[in-house]
Image (spheres, rainbow, N blue to C red):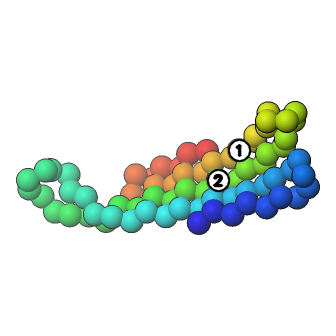
């Protein structure tokens, strides 16, 4: 899901959220299947500097529970 909102003619804020679920196995031909998941969240702010030039500030958060991984 993604949403954008124009605060003014120059300022825009947005957010994105994505969730992925699937199944994998360690070996291509053999082995047990296990569930995988990942979650991504993004917050962004955009400012129109001059005509077609924009400044963008973005924060990303990615979490993969099975790998016990969190990245910013």
Q: Residue at x 79, y 45 (%)?
A: 46
Figure quadrant of residue 53? top right
**Residue 29 on image: x %, y %:** 8, 53
> Which residue matches tag 1?
58
Judging depth in this view, the residue of 60 and 10 nearest the camera is 10
**Residue 64 on image: x %, y %:** 46, 55
**Residue 4 on image: x %, y %:** 73, 60
Q: Provide the secondary structure element on which disc 2 rests.
A: strand
> Which residue matches tag 2?
42
Does the rendering let one see residue 55?
Answer: no
Q: Provide the secondary structure element on which disc 1 rests.
A: strand
Q: Are marks 2 and 1 in contact (CB under 8 Å)?
A: yes
For residue 16, above or below residue 58: below
Judging depth in this view, the residue of 62 and 51 nearest the camera is 51
Quick check: 21 left or right of 11? Answer: left
Judging depth in this view, the residue of 53 and 37 nearest the camera is 53
Q: 10 Å neighbourhood of mark 2: few (<14), some, or many (≥20)?
A: some
Q: Residue at x 75, y 41 (%)?
A: 57
How many numbered marks does the figure carry?
2
Q: Residue at x 83, y 58 (%)?
A: 6
Residue 6: assigned label: none
For residue 17, above or below residue 51: below
Instruction: Tell which residue pokes out farthest to the left in this image.
Output: 29
**Residue 23 on image: x %, y %:** 28, 63
Figure quadrant of residue 55? top right
Q: Residue at x 85, y 41 (%)?
A: 48
Quick check: 55 left or right of 35? Answer: right
């Amino acid at each position: 899901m993604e949403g954008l909102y124009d605060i003014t003619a120059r300022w825009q804020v947005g957010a994105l959220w994505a969730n992925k679920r699937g199944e994998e196995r360690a070996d291509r031909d053999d082995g047990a299947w296990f569930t995988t998941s990942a979650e991504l969240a993004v917050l962004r702010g955009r400012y129109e500097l001059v005509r077609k030039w924009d400044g963008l500030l973005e924060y990303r958060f990615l979490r993969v529970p099975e790998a016990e991984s969190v990245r910013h």
